[in-house]
Image: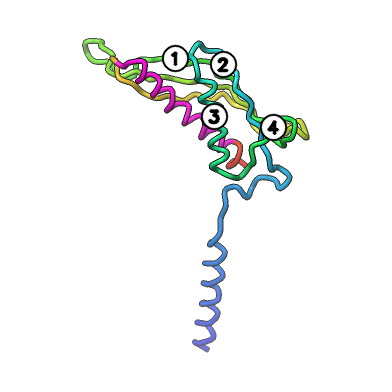
Amino acid sequence: MASKIKFVLSGLLAVTTLSCWYYSFGGSIPSDIKKIAIPLFDDNTSYPGVREDLTNMVIDAFIANNTLQIANESDTDLLLTGTILSIREQAGIVTEGEDVEQFDVYVTVKAKCENVKTGKVWWEKTLRRFGTMSGTGSQEDQQAAIAVAIEQITDDMLNNTIANW
């Protein structure tokens, strides 16, 4: 009898272990959704090259994720569009003497992902993230802070599209 119980418990342990063995974040996207188009983002700011940087980073993130294939707008299941609304510096750390030690550089993007076959909006959000630079930062420091914010926004767009299903 004891050997029978051990056998059953061993079997249950094996089944439990094997059932947890495989898990995929991408498995929740409907099977008919295979392609995404990401046209050049619009830009309401005066910062040169930012829209190209954001668009390319988003495309690269989807390629690296490999859940959806990048496609043209005329042959796609999903369309991810967006507009860079603003890029603003804000004092992040101020000393007692009211000197700014660190600026937070905020990038705000309004984005929408839509199923083009059904016309249904999967998600639509205004995304706002920031990078930091020193209070005496150069233009290169500002560009680096913008790049950090864009990277975070890219992650948000990917996660909103892939992980929320």
Determine contact: label 4, label 2, CB under 8 Å. no
Q: Is residue 107 left or right of residue 91?
A: right
- Which amino acid, mark 4? Asn
Residue that mark 3 sits on: 56
Label 4 or label 1, whichever lies nearer to me, is: 4
Of the residues under marks 4 and 3, which one precedes in the sequence? 3
Of the residues under marks 4 and 1, which one precedes in the sequence? 4
Q: x and y percent of residue 159 in the render?
A: 55, 38
Residue that mark 4 sits on: 72
Of the residues under marks 1 and 3, which one precedes in the sequence? 3
Determine contact: label 2, label 3, CB under 8 Å. no
Residue that mark 2 sits on: 43
- Start-end of magenta stretch: 137-160
Determine contact: label 2, label 1, CB under 8 Å. no
Of the residues under marks 4 and 2, which one precedes in the sequence? 2
Which residue reaches farthest left?
97
- Which amino acid, mark 3? Asn
Please name the colour scheme applied to the rendered image: rainbow
- 10 Å crowding of disc 3: few (<14), some (14-19), many (20+): some
